[in-house]
Image (cartoon, rainbow, N blue to C red):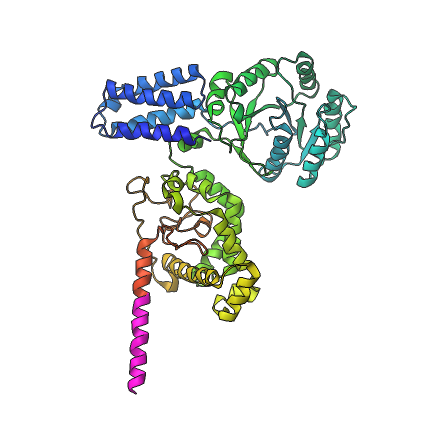
């Protein structure tokens, strides 16, 4: 969502980093670019003015002007101010007193019903609460039925309301029914309404007075831009909302609502909807959002997503299998499926520092998502025995596998070849055979900061003894096409795809050549005999 803003800010900072010294003139020119970038992102003009004024005041301080790296100091100032603009410290839900009562309000079509279900899923999974969904929208056709369907998908109870019931009575009676069912998180899905509709706004006030919800979340569509901020302000004056949820943040919205909402309403952005699945609701972290906007990536979010797909003990077992050369095609298929749960290759690259623009720079060379599906189809056409022992696959088996998945025999051969190379590189990287691990060097990647390596032991959440460059939680085994240092290309990927483990490949090539020479020498000796 912040792509265009990130591109504009990156260009502005690139010019400023090229300056030997910063003075009032080049700071003014740089901040002009920042101001234009924020205005183009649909940020409230008053918010932009205050933001630029604060940055200018700090940037003209002696600490920055006399610094050896004034450009980096300026980026740090902008980062700190962006964090404050986005809400400062992350504000979560108040879960101290049970039952937790949450009221969802907002315009019609903003995504309240789906968000209520997503939030129920989050509370059940992350916070181990037992949610109870309350359909109180008696005006929109099929709104009650929609929430019941979603509740059934989640396996959580829902209040049996009907369109002829009064919304205030539904919410009041739901509190009793939830207590009887032993639920400790109650979510009221109210009807969408305009903030100028006095009758419906009065209905919300009556529900608030009767049920006394601990949280009132205003749900807004990020695509509406500044209108979302204006409506949130009106709802806040009437109901005193406790936070905001922005939906459709995975779309091409310019991000102005997210950047303006805290300054205008004084209420924090608590959650963001990042997709259509019930698991696609993320806690909003201002510091992480600021890092993404400035092109610094978001390693912590990537770590959390990966850890959500694999337990720590499972990651240890996988690493042990790799080290002992027991990593087979069945394990590889499992890792590919886990990676898909994290997101697309492009979304993963955006979270890795310095690689946000990697897909754009690759142009026609970028990996199509269908290539991952192609590799998956080939492996699915194999028997369990073939997956566990790829060496069994001879020419006749290749023909059968190719026919089963609708591919060519050459595709099957390429996958097996690439998998074998990747397996050998994994052993080298993990120090297989009792040798000390030798980590290959990372070649320079366009757009990546000089001297940068992927997060390792210093990264938050890294386990003790974790190798430099290895991502926590078994993520190294899940990264495609060399995203973990030293790993070869993913089987099934097109030829010519850039490989980030170049040195490891050279080492492997030398080793392979040496083995071939030895075999030829043995053949000559046998012939002489």
Q: Is residue 394 visible?
A: no
As displayed, is residue 201 above or below residue 363? above
Q: Is residue 186 magenta?
A: no
Q: Name the residue located 50 percent from the left edge and 19 percent from the top edge.
A: 226
Looking at the image, residue 231 lies above or below residue 118: above
Q: Is residue 389 left or right of residue 201?
A: left
Residue farthest left in this picture? 20
State the extent of the magenta-drawn residues as a range.
512-529
In the displayed structure, does residue 158 sit left or right of residue 27? right
Q: x, y percentage for residue 196?
A: 62, 13
Instruction: Name the side, left or right, on which 248 lies relative to 138.
Output: left
Percent x, y of residue 460: 42, 40
Expressed as whole percent of the image width and height from the top left, the position of residue 323 reads: 42, 60
Q: Position of residue 478 (x, y in %)?
A: 46, 50
Residue nearest the viewer, comparing 127 with 208: 208
Whether residue 447 is situated above or below residue 387 in the rendered picture? above
Q: Nearer the viewer, residue 341 or 58?
A: 341
Q: Residue furthest right?
A: 164
Residue 294 in the image: above or below residue 263? below
Count how many numbered circles sit on residues in the image.
0
- Based on the picture, tell me whether residue 514 belongs to the magenta stretch: yes
* Residue occupying image coordinates x 33% and y 45%: 453
> Which quarter of the rendered picture does the C terminus lie within?
bottom left
Magenta stretch, main secondary structure class: helix
């Amino acid at each position: 969502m912040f792509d265009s803003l990130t591109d504009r800010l990156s260009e502005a900072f690139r010019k400023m980093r090229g300056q030997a010294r910063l003075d009032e003139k080049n700071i003014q020119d740089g901040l002009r670019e920042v101001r234009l970038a924020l205005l183009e992102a649909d940020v409230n003009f008053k918010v932009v003015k205050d933001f630029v004024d604060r940055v200018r005041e700090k940037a003209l301080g002696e600490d920055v002007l006399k610094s050896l790296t004034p450009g980096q100091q300026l980026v740090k100032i902008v980062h700190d101010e962006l964090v404050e603009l986005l809400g400062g410290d992350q504000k979560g839900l108040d879960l101290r007193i049970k039952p937790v009562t949450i009221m969802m309000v907002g315009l019609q079509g903003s995504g309240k019903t789906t968000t209520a279900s997503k939030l129920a899923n989050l509370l059940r999974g992350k916070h181990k609460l037992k949610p109870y969904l309350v359909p109180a929208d008696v005006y929109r056709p099929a709104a009650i039925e929609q929430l019941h369907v979603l509740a059934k998908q989640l396996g959580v109870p829902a209040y049996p309301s009907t369109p002829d019931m009064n919304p205030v009575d539904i919410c009041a009676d739901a509190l009793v029914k939830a207590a009887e069912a032993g639920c400790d998180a109650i979510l009221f899905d109210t009807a969408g309404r305009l903030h100028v509709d006095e009758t419906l706004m009065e209905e919300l006030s009556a529900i608030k007075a009767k049920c006394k919800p601990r949280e009132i979340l205003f749900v807004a569509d990020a695509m509406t831009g500044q209108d979302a901020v204006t409506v949130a302000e009106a709802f806040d004056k009437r109901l005193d909302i406790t936070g905001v949820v922005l939906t459709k943040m995975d779309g091409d919205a310019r991000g102005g609502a997210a950047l303006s909402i805290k300054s205008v309403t004084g209420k924090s952005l608590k959650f963001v909807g990042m997709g259509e699945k019930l698991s696609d609701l993320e806690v909003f972290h201002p510091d992480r959002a600021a890092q993404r906007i400035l092109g610094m990536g978001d390693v912590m979010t990537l770590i959390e997503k990966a850890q959500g797909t694999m337990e720590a003990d499972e990651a240890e077992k996988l690493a042990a299998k790799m080290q002992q050369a027991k990593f087979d095609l069945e394990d590889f298929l499992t890792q590919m499926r886990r990676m898909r749960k994290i997101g697309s290759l492009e979304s993963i690259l955006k979270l890795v520092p310095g690689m946000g623009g990697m897909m754009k720079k690759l142009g026609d060379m970028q990996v199509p998502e269908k290539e991952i599906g192609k590799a998956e189809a080939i492996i699915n056409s194999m028997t369990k025995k073939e997956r566990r022992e790829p060496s069994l696959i001879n020419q006749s088996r290749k023909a059968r596998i190719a026919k089963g998945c609708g591919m060519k025999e050459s595709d099957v051969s390429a996958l097996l070849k690439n998998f074998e190379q990747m397996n050998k590189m994994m052993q080298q990287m993990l120090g297989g055979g009792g040798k000390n691990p030798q980590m290959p060097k990372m070649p320079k990647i366009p757009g990546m900061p000089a001297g940068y390596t992927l997060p390792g032991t210093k990264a938050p959440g890294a386990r003790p003894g974790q190798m430099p460059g290895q991502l926590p939680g078994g993520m190294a085994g899940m990264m495609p096409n060399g995203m973990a240092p030293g790993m070869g290309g993913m089987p099934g990927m097109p030829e010519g795809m850039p490989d980030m483990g170049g040195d490891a490949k050279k080492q492997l090539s030398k080793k392979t050549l040496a083995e071939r020479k030895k075999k030829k020498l043995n053949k000559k000796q046998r012939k002489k005999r």
